[in-house]
Every structure is written in C-alpha cells, then in structure tokens.
Amino acid sequence: MARLAVFGVGRIGGEVAYLAASLGIVDELVLYDHNPALLKAQVLDLQHTGLQTSISTEKKDLRGADICVFAAGLPRNPSVKTRADLLNVNLPATQECAALLAEFSGVLITVTNPMDVNNFYLCHETGIGRERCIGFGGQLDSARFGLALQNREITGVPYVLGEHGEHQVPVFSTLAAPVPETQREDILLELRGASMAVIRGKGGTVYGPVLHIVHLIHMVLDNTGERITCSSVLDGEYGIDGCSLGVPVRVNRDGICAIEEWQLDGWEQTKMDEAGKFATDLCQLAVR
C-alpha cells in the first residue's frame, strides 16, 4: 500500500500516525523524533494496538516514504501571540528536517508553525518540487470559517486563503448571499482567535488538525484530484511569488496538480495582497 513518514511524533504527529494506520490508509510507518524517550513510547503504544503496521525508526527510511508529515517543533500555546512568533524557535527543527529529506521523492506535508514559512523553507532548502510541498492549514481554517457561517445562518461552501494565521483571507464572494464588510471583519476577527479557546482549555488543538491532515494524506494516496485550500509555494499566482501561501488547489498522487486562481472581490484582494506581503517578508527572512 503506502509508507507514511512522520517527523515529530508529539501531540499531532503521533495521532496522525495512529489514525492513518488504524484507518488502513497506510501499512508502513517511519517515525522520527528528537526526543528518543517519546519516540520509543509512541512506537510501543502503536504496537500495543495490535495493528499489523510495519514501524521503522531509522532516519534513512524517511526518504523512501510516499508522504512525509513534518510536525516537529514547539506548538502554539497561550503565551505565543501569533503562529509567526514561532519562526525562530522552530527553525532548528525545520533545518534538521531539510537535511534528512535530501533526495526525498514523495509528497511533503508541512504542519509545524509558522507553517507557510516552514513550507517555503523546506521547498527552498531541499530542492523538492513546489508541487510536492503542501502546507497544511487551509482545510482547518475553512472548517472554522464554516462553523462561523453556520452560527450566523449564512450558507455556502467555506474557503479560507492567505496566511495560516493573522493574515488569513476568508472568501465571502462565493457564498450564496452578499456579506457586508462590517460582518466580514467580525468573522475574520473571530477566525484569528478560533484556536485559542482550545489551546487555553486543553493545551493545544488535536482533533481538527489530525482529522484534516489524515484526509489530506488519503486524497494524495488515492489520487482524488479534490479541491482544498492549502499553502503552496507561489510563482506569480495571485501576483505573488517568493513565499508559500494558502490558495485553492487540486491534489493528487503527485501533490498539488493545479493551483486555481479565483477572481476575488475588492475586500478579499486587499486582504490577499496584505497576506502575500507579510508571508513574503517572513519567507525571505528565513532563507536569507
């Protein structure tokens, strides 16, 4: 079937490995973590399930995986104001991942925050094709947007573009009815802080990210061609380059098989331009 590598097997990475294996999406796991005690514990916990899943902890096996999920580093906590603030603290983990993924031929899914910057950094430093570097966050942001719309009895398919953070861009122009700008700003403010109630109450988000990451793994391995929003390394799309940013894409076995350029309205375009500038500045700082 398929081999899944997970770099960083803490709260998110460990649950992704378990759920992907338990659902039968993958039959081989390669697990790596900087903390050997945690790595050993996660391997034993998985083995105690009785799942017939091959598990390797050899770093060299990361390169032979069909998909590698990068989930190492410090997660956001109540003392971290924004995801972008994690850049310096998580850069060493990203650098280690880049070194281990030399000659990697599979699809890379970046989860570690600041996700957009880390996705761009890994693409830039490893030489992995931009179509095979998928930054995870848009699915989760879109689900949160959908909940905000549902609570206001606004109908339509929810999509969030832009940065996975303060500069996210909820798309209102594709909804069933117009949404006034004042209400758009209220919803955007809600989305920016959507994760904090979970983080304060239980230390971090788990169910939402893990479920959507595993759905993404399934989409890639099953060659579905489904549309999602994810962070992609841009080369002129939406008038932006030199960064990774959330855009609508189609995904298949090769990774991102198409980037869709939607016609945004004025409010959305302004927000997208702001997101592009913010992400580009951070991405260029990271690879300088």
Image (cartoon, helix red, strand yellow):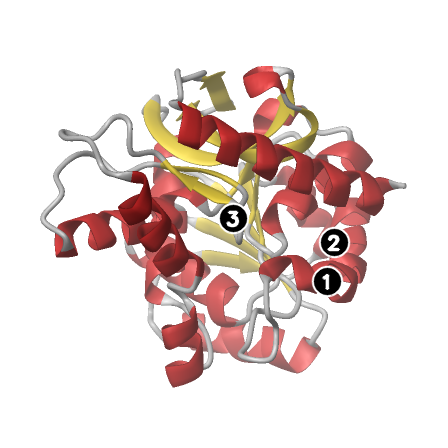
Give me the residue at 51% from left, 54% from top: 29
* Residue at the image position 33 percent from the left and 26 percent from the top: 227
> Quarter holding the N terminus?
top left
- Toward which corner of the image does residue 176 lie, by quadrant? top left
Number of numbered tags placed on the structure image: 3
Q: Residues within 10 Å of mark 1 (few under 14, many from 20)?
A: some
Q: Is residue 238 visible?
A: yes
Circles 2 and 1, Cβ within 8 Å, touching? The answer is: yes
Q: Nearer the viewer, residue 275 or 76?
A: 275
In front: mark 2 or mark 1?
1
Q: Earlier in the sequence, mark 3 or mark 1?
A: 1
Badge 3 is on which residue?
164
Query: Quick one: label 3, few (<14), some, or many (20+) residues within 10 Å?
Result: many
What is the number of the mark on residue 255? none
Of residue 87 and residue 44, the one placed in the foreground of this image is 87
- In percent of width and height, residue 205 lies at 41, 69
Give the quarter of the figure containing the C terminus.
Answer: top right
Q: According to the image, label 2 marks what residue?
A: 94
Left or right position of 125 against 195 = right
Q: Amino acid at mark 3?
A: His
Identify the disc placed on residue 90.
Answer: 1
Q: Could you tell me which secondary element the residue under label 3 belongs to?
A: loop
Residue 107, can we see it?
A: no
Q: Mark 2: few, some, or many residues within 10 Å (few <14, many ≥20)?
A: many
Which of 242/239 is in front?
A: 239
Query: Where does residue 147 sit, x and y in percent of width and height?
Result: 21, 54
